[in-house]
Amino acid sequence: MASMLHEGLLLLFRNRPTLAPELLQDALGLTLPAWSEARVESAELTEVVPTEYRADLVVLLVEDKPVFAIVVEVQLSRDEDKRKTWPLYLTSLRSRIDCPTALLVVAPNAAVARWCAQPIELGHPGFMLQPLVASPDAIPVLTDEQAARRDPELAVLSAMAHGQEEVGQAIARTVMGAVAGLEAERVRLYVDLALSSLSEAARNALEALMQRGTYEYQSNFARKYVAQGREEGRQEGEQEALLEVLDARGLEVDAASRQRILACKDLAQLKIWLRKAVTTDSVQELFASESAP
């Protein structure tokens, strides 16, 4: 399931397609051909391969015709399957667009970024993919409000990459000043993303400066993911409580029953099982009424 951080990062690149070539040029030192337009292209890469493949985002640079394509991938954790599909994304897109392509991996975590940057050997002599990775070190610390106003998406990206550092609070305050003048929903979203990236201490300090109590997320986007996270947290709490009660009563939980409990996302059902667990004589009896005709 996509996280708020993953989807938030992608939204920055969707809202400002020039952010991808800016990072490649300014942060990673890649020389790009002359271009006058950057636009989001279809990320569906199934035309030339039998299996369905979809990149996170594709940005196309145009100068009368496509001159360069960028596959943008947000990577929050290690995933060996992604390293297998990244070369396919590039070759498939190059075949479809008929122009040079590059892979830009956005990895806000330094350890994950180092993993992403490892060369991908493809076996054929000289055929090796070196991912271009926007790590925290490559993303600028943006505390200049004027610069942030010119590129608010880069300011939010800076907050998301450096929010846990000492400078995080200053970047978040810069974002708040930089988004003035944008449409209301975008302002709410960017402030939410910046604040959600801070350490708890920095967020509490900033909330105090805002003369508010617990921060209430303002954008529909953030509220969706925060609510989703809270719901998942309640489900996990009920699952853990149920397993603890069964264990405390000395009832053996076989692998299939444990998997059934952990796979259940219905909070009401978990509560029913938890109440029955207090008096049931076996784990099988816990599920008996559901399997009965």
Image: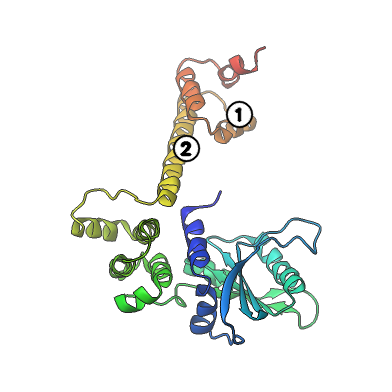
Residue 141 showing in the rendered view: no
- Which residue does the numbered mark 1 point to in the structure image? 257
* Mark 2 or mark 1: whose residue is earlier in sequence: 2
Q: Residue at x 28, y 70 (%)?
A: 170
Q: Is mark 1 on a helix, strand or loop?
A: helix
Q: Nearer the viewer, mark 2 or mark 1?
A: 2
Counting labels gives: 2
Above or below, comparing residue 108 to residue 128 in the picture = above
Dot 2, how many residues are within 10 Å of its Cα: few (below 14), some (14-19), or many (20+)? some
Given residues 128 and 174, the one toward you in this image is 174
Given residues 71 and 274, the one toward you in this image is 71
Residue located farthest toward the front when viewing the structure as drawn: 64
Left or right: residue 214 compared with residue 237: left
Residue located farthest toward the top when viewing the structure as drawn: 293
Residue 65 showing in the rendered view: yes
Given residues 29 and 292, the one toward you in this image is 29
- Which residue does the numbered mark 2 point to in the structure image? 236
Gap in Å between the C-alphas at discs 2 and 1?
A: 16 Å
Q: Residue at x 40, y 47 (%)?
A: 223
Left or right: residue 94 compared with residue 109: right
Q: Residue at x 62, y 78 (%)?
A: 62
